[in-house]
Image (spheres, helix red, strand yellow):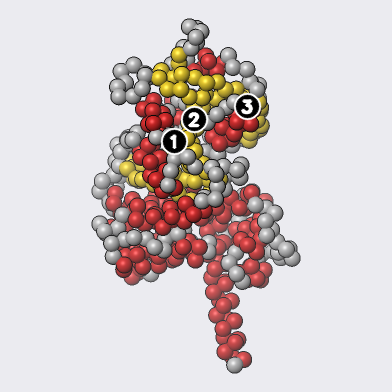
């Protein structure tokens, strides 16, 4: 990875001490050379001691660490009319030995920390990751985290109309819908509950009934990723195992008046929303049928608007990839930090690096015809030509360059797409080669003079 690019996501952090700000930037430059390596592996003894002191320092807060990256993210999306803000929570788990201070646990078998992220991606169909707009860590699960991150993200971009907030089943909450509407926020949220609705037809009392009567007006072919067997009967029911395949989804929508659940106070009795159903009418034999029920603030008056809502929800998978980059590419769960505060700081520190890995992988997948020279800093393409395992084309594409870099990290083309760790290792080796190349060039210039 180009550590200069990573440094740029940390410069300008408003920490309470200028020395801490400088340490943050230098630490980012060192760790970015191999994000998956442990601290003892990537740092000298003195740097290691300094890193542990930095993350444990009460003057250091994750919001301050992340603030320069958020600022850069806002700049990257400034010219777009609409940007998707993807929200999700991941669980970071650690074995019980050592008993880290301030961590939670849902099972009693491990210590846990929950990270809730808001990732900005382009809404133009490319799903290009632009960076984080909000991040929080918690020692217990609180449903308020959804709206808190929505408020932070909207505040960071200076309003609520540019962002469309996209969330999965866990965000299905009547109070959250009410808050979003009251704040004029835009959203697409997948339903977990079959919510009650009002209708002229007394036989229609639930969203599923209203949508089952809606005639499908559009179709969309989508690629389903493979999913293994989940543990527990509830998980198996919600996320059944499936094979990788193409699915043809039928799509329908309807305006609905959603009723407030019984016993809820302080919220409107009804909410006017749009509901969208995307379902697989004829799944393959033995494969579970796909069905998504979505509630949205967005219009669904024509086919294009219906398809847009479904495609925006499909973009939500990108944040799952971000969490993979954080867990695997940055090995966040293997960090030897002993307090909730220190680990929260580490999450804020590694989040921009995980985004950079995600962006590299995105370009490898989706910008295959782009000019490969633009994928690397000035002069590094020439170095890659000399150290690559196989000769590069005269005018390499971004795909050519990124596969060559991944090969330096041990990736074999026949094994499919490169993983998070091999990308990081490959850039580390290329960076080292570029440094040697630059030193050799300086020596030759001095000898000639």
Q: Secondary structure at mark 2?
A: loop
Seen at 47% across and 52% down, the residue is: 74
Q: Residue 168: percent from the left, percent from the top?
A: 47, 33
Seen at 25% across and 57% down, the residue is: 58
User: Residue tagged by mark 3?
Assistant: 302
CA gap between label 1 and label 2 equals 8 Å
Proximity of marks 1 and 3: CB atoms separated by less than 8 Å: no
- Callout 1 crowding tier (Cα within 10 Å): few <14, some 14–19, many ≥20: many
User: Residue tagged by mark 1?
Assistant: 185
Q: Residue 14: percent from the left, percent from the top?
A: 34, 60
Q: Residue 328: percent from the left, percent from the top?
A: 47, 50
Proximity of marks 1 and 2: CB atoms separated by less than 8 Å: yes
For marks 1 and 2 on the same chain, the one whose residue lies earlier in the sequence: 1
Q: Secondary structure at mark 1?
A: loop
CA gap between label 3 and label 2 equals 15 Å
User: Residue tagged by mark 2?
Assistant: 297
């Amino acid at each position: 990875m180009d550590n200069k690019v990573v440094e740029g996501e940390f410069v300008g952090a408003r920490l309470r001490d200028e020395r801490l700000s400088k340490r943050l930037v230098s630490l980012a430059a060192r760790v970015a050379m191999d994000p998956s390596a442990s601290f003892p592996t990537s740092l000298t003894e003195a740097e290691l001691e300094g890193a542990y002191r930095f993350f444990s320092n009460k003057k250091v807060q994750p919001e301050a660490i992340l603030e320069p990256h958020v600022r850069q993210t806002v700049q990257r999306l400034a010219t777009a009319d609409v940007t998707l803000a993807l929200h999700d929570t991941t669980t970071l788990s650690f074995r019980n030995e050592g008993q880290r201070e301030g961590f939670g646990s849902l099972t009693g078998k491990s210590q846990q920390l929950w990270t809730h992220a808001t990732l900005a991606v382009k809404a133009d169909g490319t799903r290009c990751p632009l960076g984080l707009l909000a991040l929080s860590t918690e020692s217990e699960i609180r449903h308020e985290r959804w709206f808190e991150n929505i408020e932070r993200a909207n505040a960071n971009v200076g309003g609520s109309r540019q962002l469309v907030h996209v969330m999965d089943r866990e965000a299905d909450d009547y109070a959250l819908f009410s808050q979003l509407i009251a704040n004029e926020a835009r959203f697409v949220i997948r339903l977990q509950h079959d919510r009650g609705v009002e209708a002229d037809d007394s036989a229609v009392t639930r969203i599923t009934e209203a949508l089952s009567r809606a005639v499908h007006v559009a179709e969309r072919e989508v690629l389903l990723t493979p999913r293994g067997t989940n543990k527990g009967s509830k998980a198996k029911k919600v996320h059944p195992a499936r094979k990788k395949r193409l699915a043809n989804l039928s799509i329908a929508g309807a305006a609905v008046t959603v009723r407030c659940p019984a016993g809820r106070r302080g919220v409107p009795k009804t909410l006017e929303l749009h509901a969208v159903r995307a379902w697989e009418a004829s799944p393959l034999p033995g494969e579970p049928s796909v069905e998504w029920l979505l509630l949205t603030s967005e219009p669904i008056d024509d086919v294009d608007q219906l398809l847009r809502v479904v495609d925006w929800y499909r973009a939500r998978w990108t944040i799952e990839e971000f969490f993979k980059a954080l867990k695997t590419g940055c090995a966040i769960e293997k960090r030897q930090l002993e307090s909730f505060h220190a680990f929260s700081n580490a999450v804020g520190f590694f989040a921009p690096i995980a985004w950079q890995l995600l962006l590299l992988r995105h370009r490898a997948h989706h910008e295959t015809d782009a000019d490969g020279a633009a994928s690397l800093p000035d002069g590094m393409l020439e170095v890659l030509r000399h150290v690559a395992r196989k000769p590069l084309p005269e005018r390499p594409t971004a795909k050519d360059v990124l596969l060559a870099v991944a090969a330096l990290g041990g990736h074999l083309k026949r094994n499919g797409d490169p993983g998070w760790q091999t990308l990081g290792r490959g850039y580390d080796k290329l960076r080292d080669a570029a440094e040697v190349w630059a030193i050799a060039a300086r020596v030759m210039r001095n000898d000639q003079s």
